[in-house]
Each structure stands twice: as C-alpha cells, then as structure tokens.
Image: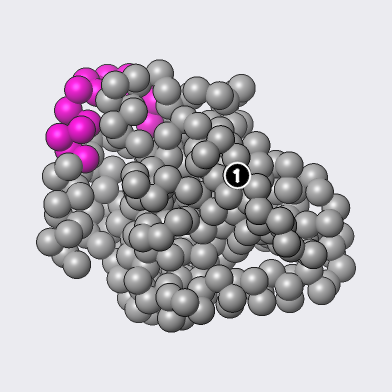
Amino acid sequence: MTVETIDDVLLVERADDHAVVTMHRPQARNALNAALRRALHHVLAELDADAAVHAVVLTGSDPAFCAGLDLVELSAAPDSLDAGFSGASDYRRPIPTMRTPVIGAVNGVAVTGGFELALACDFLVASERARFADTHARVGIMPGWGMTVLLPQAVGVRRAVELSTTGNFLDAATAYEWGLVNHVVAHDDLLPRCRALARDIASNDPAGVAQLLSTYRDGALLTDGDALELEQERSREWLGSRDAADFDERRRAVVERGRSQS
C-alpha cells in the first residue's frame, strides 16, 4: 500500500484493488475549503480512470467526517465557492459522476455540505460516533449539492423535511433505523469493514458493477433530475442575495448547538 498526500488536505491510499481517500483537515473538522473541494474532485476523477481501482472508500481524519463548507473562508471570500471548478457540472455535485462505487465511511459528524457529501456516496457505513445534521437553514445558506433530492431518497420526505427545518442532529443508531446508513460498527472497525466491502466489490466483474451502478443512478434520477437543477438555481440565487459577513457568527452558533446535543 502507498499513501500520497495531496495539497496537505487529502490522503490517498492505494491497495491492490481499491483506494481509501481521507479528507485531512482535522483542525477544521475537515471543512471543505476550496483546496479540499478541488483536490477531492480531481483525485476521485483520477481514481475512477484507474483500471486497477474497483472501489473507493471516502472518510475523514478523526474526529469528524466533514463539517461542511468552510464558512470562515466563504465569509472572507464568497467567490471561493466556485474556485478551481470549470463549469456547472463540477459545481453541481461534491463527487464527480463515477463508474467506480464510492463507500462513505462516516467516522464522525457529517454536517450540512458534509452531509451532502456523504449522501453523494453510493452507500454508507457509520462509526458508532457518526452524527448527521443539515444546518443550512441555521447557517443562512441553501443546499446546492443534492440535499433536497438525495436525503428524501434515503429517509423519506417527511423525515428529510424534519432534519432540514430543525437542524437537529441524527445519531448513528437512528440513521441506521431510518435507512440512511447500511451498517453501524465500532469506531475502530469502520475502515476494516469498509475495506472488506471494497474487496467484495472488486471481486466482481468491473464492467458489470459499473453497469449496475449507472442503472441505479439513472433510475433514481429519472424523475428528480429537474429537482437537482431547481435546487442549484435556488442555491445560487440565495447565496447571491445574502450578506456573507454573518456566516462566521452563524457557524459558531451551529457548532455550539451541536455540542449541546452531544
């Protein structure tokens, strides 16, 4: 196995038949600054093009999976949202469209944009320490990475609306009960379990896996593709109409509220 560090924000470990990608900004709870978003998109695209990689495990450096967009950076430089991205298809999703299955290994909190990143994975395995929250409304921003489409697909519309309008945290056990995650495991067993699943995927015919994956994805979006476009349009309109100066204060309030719900 080899481990490569990308721009000091991403760790990429290649095994014989799969890769583990680790978001590595632990001091910022792996918040998605422009450098991390750019590196993540480019690395996943490269792994997808590598014939030796048949599955990807995506996780975060402890203690968090991902705290969402880096609101400190965004409040200082609102234009950073699109930094390093060439077009709408890049902006639309946190993960590029891939033939290779992506397993989300949720090791801690997955909040707002980090929650959307988890939802963009093909399926999720959660540590007992995992927690999920959609705090878009609390922060004063709108989702643009599929929250209003992918979350209802995972847990149903009414539960999705509850999560988004309250901003409350969802623990790992409830996430499993609601169908958001496939498995909940002891924290130390998270990566071994995900690696084993990646090897199971790799043991199949790669072309068959890719065909199945594309069929699932295309079928799931058959009636919701327009909804994704609508969400992106509304997100851009909302961001353009807001004063970014209060993002940092709202971010701190969200962090404190999350701690109080521990």
Residue 142 % position (x, y): 33, 36
Q: What colouring method underlies this structural image?
A: one colour
Residue at horizontal 33 percent and vertical 65 percent from the top: 131
Give the magenta-colored segment's residue range: 234-251
Q: Quadrant of the N terminus?
A: bottom right
The secondary element bearing badge 1 is classed as strand
**Residue 223 in view, yes or no:** no
- Name the side, left or right, on which 246 lies relative to 91: left
**Quarter holding residue 16:** bottom right
State the residue at coordinates (20%, 50%).
255
Task: Say if residue 24 shows up in the picture.
Answer: yes
- Whether residue 82 is situated above or below residue 260 in the rendered picture: above
Tell me where residue 213 sits by quadrant.
Answer: bottom right
Q: Is residue 178 above or below residue 259?
A: below
- Answer left or right for 116 relative to 216: left
Q: Position of residue 26 (x, y in %)?
A: 39, 50
Residue 243 percent coordinates (x, y): 21, 20
Can you identify the residue that label 1 sits on?
A: 5
Residue density around tag 1, few if under 14, some if 14–19, many if 20 or more, within 10 Å: few
Q: Position of residue 210 (x, y in %)?
A: 78, 58
Residue drawn at 51 percent across, 65 percent down: 105
In the image, what residue type sits under mark 1? Answer: Thr
